Image (cartoon, grey):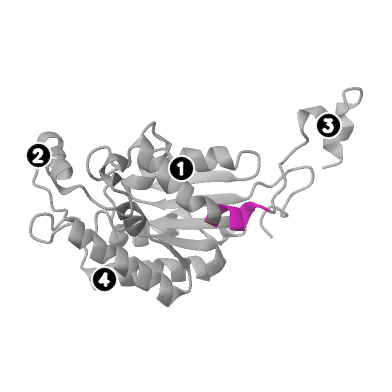
Amino acid sequence: MAGDNRKEGVVSWPKVVLFGDSLTQRGFSSEGCWCSLTADYLTRKCDVLNRGFSGYTSRWCKLALPKLVTSTEAKDILLFTIFLGANDSNDSIINLRQHVPLEEFKQNLVEIVEYLQSIGVGRDKIVLIGPPAVDEQAWARYSREVNNMESGKTDALTKAYSQAVSQAASQSGTEFIDIFSEMKKSDNWRTMLVDGLHFSNTGSHFVFDILKPTIDRRTSHLPTLLPDWKDVNTENPEDSFNRL
């Protein structure tokens, strides 16, 4: 079990790996803070590793993953999230560089899961997350003013890619989290996005709240690592740590 592998006198920290595009890369920022919320929640239980890559698609992430995670690291992984689709779902004419056809996108996710399984990450530890809803007007404005390009994003196209994530999860036997549908249940879902695409602080807390039950199912059994300060033997502190 992850967390039980330890060298003499060294405590092994289980790992939670958050893998994806800019929605994950920004996950420790003040706005897009769902990753830092996760890390804070798991303090002294797990190492939470951000492996987000802004602008990346499933096509590129599939190629990058073997460079990032091998069987050596896999033994300590308790949870591995795959959060992709926000870039793949760009319109093929407006943004061919990032567009990945729907069927290829789904197959890429399946192959990412297959790779993780091949190195020892069980499917019960893998979670596929669908892309969030898009505020088309806000993102089109941001794209013109900041990126100096037209937006290739539509809400309808994003929904189709979210459904493809669901299908990939079903095919792979992994858990699926439907951020798109959960956002749309709120009349104020646009406030969850800071620029029409990336999460605001409100949106980040929303995502963390949705993920929390999934995190709990995989980490609730973990102890707090190293003694609480109140339990350290002040007269012989070495004894408190030598007994780990």
Label tally: 4
Identify which amino acid the numbered label 4 is placed on: Glu
Q: CA distance from mark 3 to mark 4?
A: 54 Å
Q: Is residue 217 magenta?
A: yes
Q: Of circles 2 and 4, which is in front?
A: 2
Q: Which residue is mark 4?
A: 104
In the orientation shown, which residue stands out farthest toward the right?
235
Label ID, residue 100 = none
Q: Residues within 10 Å of mark 4 (few under 14, many from 20)?
A: some
Horizontally, is 46 left or right of 118 in the view? right
Dots 1, 3 in contact, CB < 8 A = no
Q: Which mark is residue 231?
A: 3
Name the amino acid type tagged 2: Arg
Q: How would you rate the neighbour count of disc 1 (Cα within 10 Å): few for under 14, some for 14-19, many for 20 or more?
A: many
- Mark with earlier residue (2, 4): 4
First in sequence: mark 2 or mark 1?
Answer: 1
For disc 2, the marked residue is: 144
Dividing the image into 4 quarters, which one contains the N terminus? bottom right
The amino acid type of the residue labelled 1 equals Cys
Secondary structure state at the residue bearing disc 3: helix
Q: Looking at the rendering, which quadrant does residue 139 occupy?
A: top left
